[in-house]
Image (tube, rainbow, N blue to C red):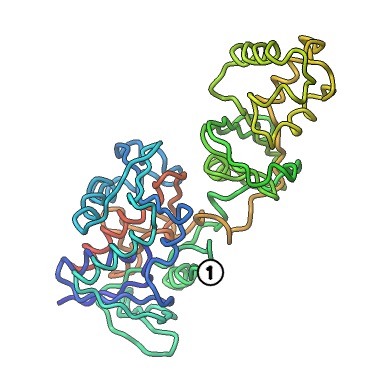
């Protein structure tokens, strides 16, 4: 029986362990935390967006960094395969807007408990509070692992699934990158991905915490539009955040060399013509009121003062006295709100780490290292990045599947 050591008990490591054990291997997971899936427990604001129900080509197109590397993994273990597996172990799922898949209970913990059930069923052994210090290599062949206490453990195969460096409190401290580097692998530049953006123009105090839906965003680099999206946004004390902003952050590179700004459209579902007609209807309704009291039907209460200041229209001006030119300025203050970007939030707050083990050094059909026989990689440690929507977790599960079945052979 082949002996497989899995380093890391997150999404990728757990699935790798399950399938390696189901394929007949003697599998032990080594986890430096005292529980499995610590990051899984908090992902998706505690709801865990496990995958996306779109077709595989759509999923690959949403893996914006090295998506082509994922063809074998995704077609070997698809989103449908993943959902069927979870359902087999009793986890009820639901599909929400954007084909995002969540547990029906809205509890990430239920996903972790299901994975625990799977691991127990497969006979996977788990060693908690065990930090792996290094991997043991002889003649370009894996021989095992060395724990932090100096103990050496023999293994025919080793899967490194230690995650990235985001959310360090969950145990993601970059250990796997060091092991991969010592094994001769190149690690591409690590930076935050799917993070909030710090802006020059800070939201007003009353706007902080406000969540908006159906917002249009456009990201500009040196005055050229490079990305646009539609969806949810949140104002924070440092700037802007939320799903659309996290996805946009993936395109923000060097803020020292380049100028970046975001333009928000609060009424993206309406053309300028339709919005103007809407404003005229509201102005007719409130024609005898002051300007500041004519926007309640159009905007969230906490944004009214902000938009008034952008429009530069006297808040006490009677609505029937507002000119066509002023009305145009109001329209632009709703559909063209500019936030200049200072920088991306720290990597510790990012959902995922951009960068990792260079994909050209990994066999995409097996996840085995092309440099060290018997060494496998899965999950965030690999240089794969995707937008929000369940794509990153699906990539981790699919890589874990290939690493699991391949390491057991």
For this orientation, the residue located farthest to the bottom is 150
Please name whichever residue, 295 or 54, is drawn nearer the observer in this view of the structure. 295
Rendered image quadrant of residue 136: bottom left
Provide residue 402's location: percent of width, then percent of height.
Answer: 26, 58
> Which residue bears the numbered disc 1?
169
Q: Is residue 118 above or below residue 234?
A: below
Q: Is residue 298 above or below residue 8?
A: above
Provide residue 219's location: percent of width, then percent of height.
Answer: 61, 34
Q: Is residue 134 above or below residue 116?
A: below
Provide residue 79's location: percent of width, then percent of height.
Answer: 28, 46
Location of the C terminus by quadrant is bottom left
Q: Residue at x 77, y 14 (%)?
A: 288
Q: Residue at x 45, y 56 (%)?
A: 46
For this orientation, the residue located farthest to the front is 288
Q: Is residue 44 above or below residue 200?
A: below
* 56 on left or right of 288: left
Please name whichever residue, 233 or 197, is drawn nearer the observer in this view of the structure. 233
């Amino acid at each position: 029986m082949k002996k497989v050591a899995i380093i890391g008990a997150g999404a990728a490591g757990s699935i790798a362990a399950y399938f390696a054990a189901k394929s007949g291997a003697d599998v032990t997971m080594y986890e430096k935390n005292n529980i499995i899936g610590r990051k899984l427990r908090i992902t998706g604001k505690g709801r865990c967006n496990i995958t996306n129900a779109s077709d595989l080509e759509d999923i690959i197109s949403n893996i914006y960094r090295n998506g082509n590397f994922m063809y074998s993994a995704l077609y070997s273990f698809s989103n449908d395969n993943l959902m069927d597996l979870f359902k087999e172990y009793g986890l009820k799922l639901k599909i929400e807007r954007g084909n995002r898949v969540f547990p029906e209970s809205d509890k990430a913990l239920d996903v972790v408990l299901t994975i625990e059930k799977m691991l127990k069923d497969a006979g996977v052994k788990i060693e908690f509070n065990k930090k792996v210090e290094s991997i043991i290599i002889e003649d370009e062949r894996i021989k095992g692992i060395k724990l932090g206490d100096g103990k050496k453990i023999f293994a025919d195969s080793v899967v490194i699934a230690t995650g990235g460096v985001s959310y360090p409190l969950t145990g993601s401290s970059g250990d796997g990158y060091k092991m991969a580097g010592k094994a001769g692998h190149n690690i591409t530049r690590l930076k935050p991905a799917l993070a909030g953006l710090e802006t020059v123009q800070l939201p007003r105090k009353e706007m902080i915490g406000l969540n908006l839906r159906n917002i249009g965003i456009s990201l500009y680099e040196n005055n050229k539009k490079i990305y646009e999206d539609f969806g949810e946004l949140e104002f924070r004390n440092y700037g802007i955040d939320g799903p659309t902003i996290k996805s946009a952050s993936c395109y923000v590179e060097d803020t020292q060399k380049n100028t970046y700004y975001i333009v928000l459209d609060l009424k993206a579902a309406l053309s300028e013509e339709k919005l103007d007609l809407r404003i005229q209807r509201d102005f007719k309704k409130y024609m005898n009121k002051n300007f500041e009291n004519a926007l309640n039907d159009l905007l969230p209460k906490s944004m009214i003062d902000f938009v008034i200041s952008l429009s530069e229209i006297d808040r006490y001006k009677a609505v029937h006295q507002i000119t066509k030119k002023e009305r145009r300025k109001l329209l632009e203050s709703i559909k063209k709100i500019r936030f200049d970007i200072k920088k991306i939030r720290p990597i510790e707050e990012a959902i995922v780490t951009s960068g990792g083990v260079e994909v050209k050094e990994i066999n995409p059909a097996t996840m085995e290292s092309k440099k060290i026989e018997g060494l496998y990689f899965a999950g965030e440690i690999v240089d794969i990045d995707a937008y929000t929507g369940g794509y990153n977790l699906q990539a981790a599960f699919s890589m874990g599947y290939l690493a699991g079945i391949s390491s057991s052979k």
